[in-house]
Amino acid sequence: QVFAFHERPGAFRRLTPPYERVEVERREGSIRNGDRTVLRMRLGPLSRRWVAEHRGYEAGRQFVDVQVSGPFARWEHLHRVEPNGDGGSVMIDRVRYALPLGGLGAALGKGMVEKRLKRMFAYRHEVLAHDAQLHARAAGRTLKVAMTGASGLLGTSLTALLESGGHTVVPLVRGEDRPGIQWSPRQGTIDRAALEGFDAVVHLAGENLAQRWSEGTKERIRASRWQGTKLLANAIAELERPPATFVSMSAVGFYGASGDAVLDESSARGDDFLAEVCVGWEEASRRAEEVGVRVVNPRMGVVLSPAGGALSLMKIPFWMGLGGRVGDGAQYMSWVGIDDAVGALYWALLEPSLRGPVNVTAPEPVTNRRFTDTLGRVLRRPTPFPLPAAVVKLALGEMGEATLLGGQRVQPTALEASGYPFAHRRLEDALRHLLGRPV
């Protein structure tokens, strides 16, 4: 199972740390002898192509990446999987490399390369172990999943996770020049016939919240969530063979600004704009439930990833020593690492006990003050510059007040009851993993 993970198209994206600016430019075949993977590495404004050829393939056991062209004078990476005797596996990564410029290159760069490699493999092995747990839950089933928002932060990561488990993902797209299932929430159109035969539909698409909320913006936010969800739910309900599961997003904004009250899925809705949006969002998915489809509404917390979202905006000022708490720092932040965000969505596809609202947050929410202190400690930077509440309100208006100064203390009660194996329960562990900053 672990070796098969590496043969699948999502594996490289799953194993590439989000703090590394590396992407797959082209993949020629898989990992069998003679197949090649072409990567693009970026360092600031510069980029470099890295071409690796796969050799030494032994089915179920090993393969070797050999650099054909790239940043090293020589690079050979052996990937080998060995049984450990009790039903598990040992993943062995052995790298032999030489830096350019001979002895001078080694003197100048070896320490940095060694440190970077150790960080990278620590990240890879942690992700591999967690993903293997999730894939084992699938118990040999392979799912065919239709997905909206597949090109976003959550969508790209969830697609990679599903594909690395042998599942098939087909995106819903706008524009006939893109491969996938055509749909247009604004026009109320969808290719219903193309939705036949899917095991599940995952709905992630929605207008970005991180902008000033004029009345026009609010209407676009409502419409992007309500109309798209209603269109999908109605289409699903009209299919001859509807999917078994419809995972349709929501958010912890459902609860409104709630102070330090501990919230679970049974807690009451809030009374602000985000709560209104989330209530309508969830209600729009109910039509699918009427025809026997299991509907899950993940109430997503603040997703942490240096590749996008809140953490990507904070990491540079915090790295420069310019970070600080927001307002008085007492507001709670219900966070979740990207691996658990997509892991929980995958779990929702696999776990029949989950239905209705499901909080997707780490079990230990923190105050903004504690988040600030923890991020500063992980980056080894001071956090002396608070952002006053008045500045937030002036610069960002209602959006800033709701998302930065309001807060919720949310517990993932349904997820924990279903047995979901969290990759990171503690904030510091998650940040060190995501930012490549081991203790």
Image (cartoon, rainbow, N blue to C red):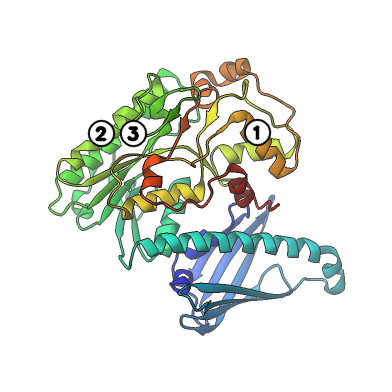
- Dot 3: what SS? helix
Q: Which residue is mark 1?
A: 372
Label 2 with label 3: CB-CB less than 8 Å:
yes
Q: Is residue 241 above or below residue 377?
A: below
Q: Position of residue 402 (x, y in %)?
A: 49, 23
Q: CA distance from mark 1 to mark 3?
A: 31 Å
**Amino acid residing under circle 3:** Arg
Q: Mark 2 vs mark 3: which is more N-terminal?
A: 3
Q: Is residue 389 visible?
A: yes
| Total numbered badges shown on the rendered structure | 3
Q: Left or right: 54 with respect to 249? A: right
Which of the numbered marks, if any, corresponds to residue 225? 3
Image depth: mark 2 or mark 1 in front: 1
Q: Is residue 149 visible?
A: no
Q: Is residue 222 above or below residue 67?
A: above
Residue drawn at the location 50% of the way across and 30% of the way down: 210
Mark 1: give few (<14), some (14-19) or many (20+) Cα within 10 Å. Answer: many
Front one among 177 and 203: 203
The image quarter containing residue 377 is top right
Q: Which residue is mark 2?
A: 284
Image depth: mark 2 or mark 3 in front: 2
Label 1 with label 3: CB-CB less than 8 Å:
no
**Amino acid residing under circle 1:** Thr
Residue drawn at the location 19% of the way across and 44% of the way down: 235
